[in-house]
């Protein structure tokens, strides 16, 4: 594997060659090992959809899909995701057609300031795929894969990693519910 | 953040060898705690050895009817595993009551065991903290300690261990498999985490270079459950949690396992309560007596005495619910 910076002074930045697939396009460049996936997306790829809210994994505004699974991009070191397939909010729409969840957010007025919205969208898409795969939640921890009924309690529990400081939950929940049905 | 070298290993042995390159090297799992601590200046490794992609991502049934969980298994995959959900509900519930969906997708089993305390003084590099900087003092004893320890703390540290998963695994008598510079060895999870004593900088009995490779859980026939109290409905650390397993015979307690989270420097196995309960009638009165016997050794700080009745009530509730369902 890459071992950039060998022999360099300990305090000098260490660069490692990194390749990713981001929203369907190959991307490859040397990156500082300290770079989070979030900073890489925002500052080197210009994809500013994923937001830096807390930068500690507590707010979910940075949520993206990594190899199909939702993850906090702020706590993911870019170099630890060599070869990964990343989807950000910019990659959800197909050409001019919005993802059904994006459309539902508009129809249900599921945002106010919009800062948490990219993370909410990516998280909800990952969450719906987890349900599809039969993943349990604290609401239904031991239910069989076919027994998960997506209701408000399930959505609120499964989306608890995404904070909306405007408090738009009252419309976010129906938007997700509408798409799941 | 301090610059660091980054290496991946193909095997546990190679990871151990890579780590020995630097005194300040650390293993990287999912990074959900370590990356945060690096950003806070609490952890300052000069080399990260990434062990998250080692071939330690399997969950296997053991010949004795137990389960062996690879250290790199993601928390979400462990909670979703059919074996875990059907035979060890306490473990599935503990995992699902910890963190958030997206954090559980990153976090590994090994990293979950080795996460550090969320005590605010430990996480603030500008403050004294005996765990972060031995001998610098502990502002928590007189300061912000509402959510810190009531059991087993010392003059030097009143921190709590934050894991939910580890509380369930302690109740299940799990064994941690460790690969180290001098070979592989098993460590019972009850002896894996330490009480702070006068060395709060050491969370566990692991030595420099040791790598957790797997966690083994023996077979369990008893019913089990995890109950957690937190300050909001979801995505918060435990104020108090209880992992319990209960096996009854004609209304009497044949076997019981009990562990507490959020109350001590380590997941607290409630052996006094267990001994008090064995052979007793499975009644609310005996559950309460056992809980009180365990908590007789608790020593509240100025602002966290509320945890003692909370722990008592939660133990009674968890055991009563298990008894009712039997």
Image (spheres, coloured by chain):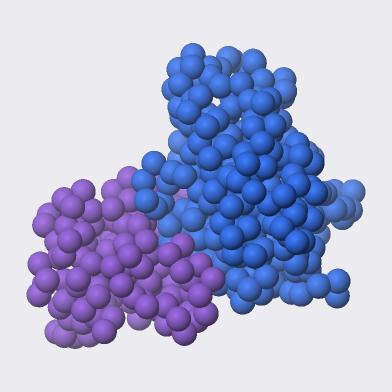
Chain colours: A purple, B blue
Is residue B250 at least partly visible in the picture? yes
Q: Position of residue A69 (x, y in %)?
A: 44, 72
Q: Specify the quadrant of the image occupied by residue B324.
A: bottom right
**Image vertical order of residue B222 relative to residue B27, above or below:** below
Camera-side residue: A93 or A136? A136
Seen at 35% across and 57% down, the residue is A160
Which image quadrant: the C terminus of chain B? bottom right
At a point 46% along the width and 21% down the height, the residue shown is B303
Residue B127, horizontal then vertical, whole percent? 48, 20
Left or right, B204 with respect to A70, comes to right
Q: Is residue A164 left or right of residue B191?
A: left
The one nearer the camera, A127 or B221, is B221
Q: Residue at x 46, y 53 (%)?
A: B99
| Residue B134 in view | no
Horizontal relation, residue A67 to residue B290: left or right:
left
Query: Observer-nearest residue: B144 or B116?
Result: B144
Seen at 33% across and 65% down, the residue is: A153
- On the image, the x and y values in percent for residue B174 come to 76, 55
Left or right: A91, with A114 as reference point:
right
Name the spot of residue A21 as percent of width and height, x first.
Answer: 41, 75
């Amino acid at each position: 594997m890459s071992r950039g910076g060998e022999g360099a002074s300990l305090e000098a930045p260490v660069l490692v060659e990194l390749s990713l697939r981001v929203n369907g396009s190959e991307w490859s460049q040397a990156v500082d090992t300290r770079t989070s996936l979030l900073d890489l997306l925002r500052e080197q790829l210009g994809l500013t959809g994923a937001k830096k809210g807390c930068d500690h994994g507590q707010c979910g505004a940075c949520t993206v899909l990594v190899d199909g699974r939702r993850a906090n991009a702020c706590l993911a070191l870019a170099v630890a995701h060599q070869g990964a397939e990343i989807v950000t909010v910019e990659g959800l729409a197909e050409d001019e057609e919005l993802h059904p969840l994006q459309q539902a957010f508009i129809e249900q007025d599921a945002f106010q300031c919009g800062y948490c919205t990219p993370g909410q969208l990516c998280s909800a898409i990952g969450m719906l795929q987890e349900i599809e795969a039969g993943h349990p939640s604290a609401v239904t921890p031991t239910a069989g894969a076919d027994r998960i009924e997506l209701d408000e309690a399930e959505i609120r529990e499964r989306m608890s990693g995404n904070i909306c400081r405007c408090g738009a939950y009252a419309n976010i929940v129906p938007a997700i519910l509408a798409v799941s049905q | 953040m301090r610059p660091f070298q980054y290496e991946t290993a193909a095997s546990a042995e190679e990871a151990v060898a890579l780590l020995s390159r630097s005194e300040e090297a650390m293993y990287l799992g999912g990074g959900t705690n370590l990356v945060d601590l690096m950003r806070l200046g609490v952890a300052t490794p000069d080399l990260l050895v990434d062990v998250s992609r080692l071939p330690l991502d399997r969950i296997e049934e053991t010949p004795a009817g137990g389960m062996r969980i690879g250290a790199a298994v993601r928390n979400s995959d462990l909670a979703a595993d059919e074996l875990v959900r059907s035979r060890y509900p306490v473990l599935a519930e503990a995992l699902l009551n910890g963190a958030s969906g997206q954090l559980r997708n990153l976090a590994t089993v090994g990293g979950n065991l080795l996460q550090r305390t969320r005590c605010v003084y430990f996480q603030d590099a500008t403050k004294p903290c005996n765990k972060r900087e031995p001998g610098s003092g502990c502002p928590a004893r007189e300061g912000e300690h509402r959510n810190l320890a009531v059991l087993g703390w010392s003059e030097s540290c009143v921190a709590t261990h934050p894991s939910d998963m580890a509380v369930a695994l302690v109740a299940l008598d799990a064994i941690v498999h460790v690969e180290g510079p001098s070979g592989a060895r098993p460590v019972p999870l009850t002896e894996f985490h330490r009480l702070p004593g006068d060395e709060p900088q050491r969370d566990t009995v692991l030595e420099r270079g040791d790598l957790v490779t797997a966690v083994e859980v023996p077979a369990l026939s008893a019913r089990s459950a995890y109950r957690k109290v937190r300050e909001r409905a979801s995505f918060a650390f435990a104020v108090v949690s209880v992992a319990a397993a209960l096996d009854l015979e004609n209304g009497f307690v044949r076997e019981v396992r009990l562990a507490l989270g959020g109350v001590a420097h380590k997941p607290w196995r409630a052996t006094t309560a267990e001994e008090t309960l064995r052979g007793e009638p499975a009644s609310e009165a005996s559950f309460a007596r056992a809980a009180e016997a365990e908590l007789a050794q608790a020593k509240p700080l100025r602002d966290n005495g509320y945890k003692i009745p909370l722990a008592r009530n939660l133990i009674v509730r968890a055991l009563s619910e298990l008894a009712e369902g039997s």
